[in-house]
Amino acid sequence: MMDEFYVKKITEEVFKKAKDKSASHKKYALAKEVEAATRLSYRTIERTYDKYIRRKD
C-alpha cells in the first residue's frame, strides 16, 4: 500500500515534468517524452499512468 503511494507520486511528478517539455499533453506524447529521457518503454509508462493516475486495471 505504501509502495503504491510512492509510485503514484513519482508518476505524477514525471508526467508533470513531461508536460513542461512536450507540446502535446496527450498521454502517448508524454510517455514518449519520458521514454526519450529514461530507459523505460513508453508502454510501461502508459500502463503505470493508467494504473496509478487513471485507476484503470
Image (tube, rainbow, N blue to C red):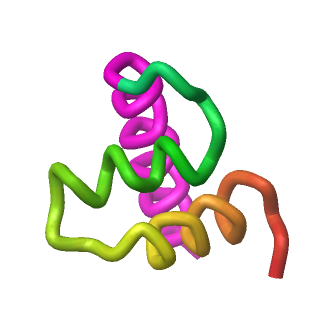
Residue positioned 17% across, 60% down in the render: 38
Residue 50, given in percent of the width and then of the height, sits at 70, 65
- Answer left or right for 3 relative to 34: right
Q: Observer-nearest residue: 19 or 23?
A: 23
Residue 21, given in percent of the width and then of the height, sits at 32, 22
- The quarter of the rendered structure image containing the C terminus is bottom right
Depicted 27 relative to depicted 50: above or below: above
Q: Residue furthest bottom?
A: 57
Q: Is residue 54 magenta?
A: no
- Answer left or right for 4 relative to 53: left
- Answer left or right for 2 relative to 10: right
Q: Quadrant of residue 17?
A: top left
Q: Main secondary structure of the magenta part?
A: helix
Per the rendered image, the range of residues in magenta is 1-21
Depicted 8 relative to depicted 57: above or below: above
Q: Residue furthest right?
A: 56
Residue positioned 57% across, 65% down in the render: 46
The number of discs equals 0
Q: Is residue 16 magenta?
A: yes
- Answer left or right for 1 relative to 57: left
Residue positioned 60% across, 59% down in the render: 49
Depicted 9 relative to depicted 19: above or below: below
Residue positioned 38% across, 33% down in the render: 18
- The quarter of the rendered structure image containing the N terminus is bottom right
Residue 37, given in percent of the width and then of the height, sits at 16, 50
Residue 9, given in percent of the width and then of the height, sits at 47, 46
